[in-house]
Amino acid sequence: MTSNILLACHGLSAVVDEKPILHEIDLEIPQGEVHVLMGPNGAGKSTFGHVLMGDPVYEVTAGDISFDGEDVTELAPDKRSRAGLFLSFQAPVEIPGVPLRSFLRAIMEGRGEKMKNKEFRKKLQALAETLDMDPAYLDRELGVGFSGGEKKKVEMMQLLLLQPKLAILDETDSGLDVDALSVVSRGMELYRGTCDGTLLIITHNTRILEHLNVDRVHVMVQGRVVAEGSADLIAEIDANGFERYEAQLDA
Ligand code: ADP
Ligand code: MG
């Protein structure tokens, strides 16, 4: 590979139930950068995240996705995960009867990572401390009775355990409270700091971006990328919304 482009989509179009959602998306993310995807509700941002992960609900009808120098357009989600792609769960999981500890272990093993039990315990303990999580949570049933902030801690634990090459965090509709917000910010900082991770953050909530150096912003409206720019675009959108982009498309 001659460039340091980690993710590249070219002319990517996708449908769900034969309904076109994404239209000829061109988007590139160089290794190590922080990118933000913004857009009004229903623009197709979450769909884009799921298409990148290979969610079979969506069908790619044109274009391709290359990741880390490999064409992943036809790869199954687990293979993409092994290649280093990660998408945060927007709907938090609850699995009664399964302790958080076992869930995290299963995720690691699913990724083909073998680790001794004792070593894994130590690692989880350290992670819980870093994230200010009561280690007792590791033995509680996954998600059952967890607060919004605690669910986010579980998500950030997954991120920091798996250390993916690209983390796509879809925070758009999750209604983050102040607690959850600070957990996500901290998790993102740790991910950046410990593994020089590349980020694609899907969000309306620009407070989440305050502690990050955002390299590039992509604006999606009606399934198209209609604008791209530097971090300055965030303040501009905060002030003016998406109307002018929508007006351009409707014209
Ligand atoms: P955003 O995340 O930008 O708010 P989405 O990607 O969730 O937007 O949705 C974009 C469009 O695709 C919406 O019209 C939505 O109803 C539709 N859509 C997304 N996923 C599905 C699905 N699984 N089945 C049917 N329609 C879907
Ligand atoms: Mg969404």
Image (cartoon, rainbow, N blue to C red):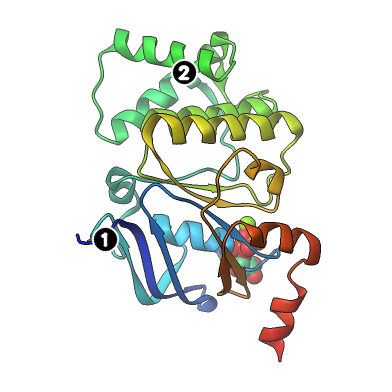
Label annotation for residue 65: none
Confirm whether residue 75 shows in the render: yes
Decide which of 146, 179 is in the foreground and name it.
179
Where is residue 165 drawn, in percent x and y?
Answer: 35, 44
Confirm whether residue 54 shows in the render: no
Residue receiving disc 1: 3
Q: Secondary structure at mark 1?
A: loop
Residue receiving disc 2: 127
> Ligand 2 lies in which image quarter?
bottom right
Which quarter of the image is occupied by the C terminus?
Answer: bottom right
The reply to whether the C-beta atoms of the residues labelled 2 and 1 are less than 8 Å apart is no
Q: Distance between the Cα atoms at labels 2 and 1?
A: 34 Å
**Residue placed at 65% from the left, 62% from the top?**
233
Which quarter of the image is occupied by the N terminus?
Answer: bottom left
Quarter location, residue 55: bottom left
Q: Secondary structure at mark 2?
A: helix
| Residue type of the residue flagged with mark 2 | Leu
**Residue placed at 64% from the left, 68% from the top?**
43
Decide which of 78, 64 is in the foreground and name it.
64
Where 12 sits versus 193, above or below?
below
Where is residue 42 drawn, in percent x and y?
Answer: 67, 66
Where 193 sits versus 75, above or below?
above
Residue neighbourhood size for the residue with mark 2, other residues' Cα within 10 Å, grouped as few (<14), some (14–19), many (≥20): some
| Residue type of the residue flagged with mark 1 | Ser
Where is residue 219 drawn, in percent x and y?
Answer: 60, 67
Quick one: label 2 or label 1, which is nearer the N terminus? 1
Name the front one of labels 2 and 1.
1
Decide which of 104, 196 is in the foreground and name it.
196
* 18 on left or right of 62: right
* 235 on left or right of 108: right
Q: Residue furthest bottom?
A: 251
**Residue placed at 53% from the left, 36% from the top?**
188
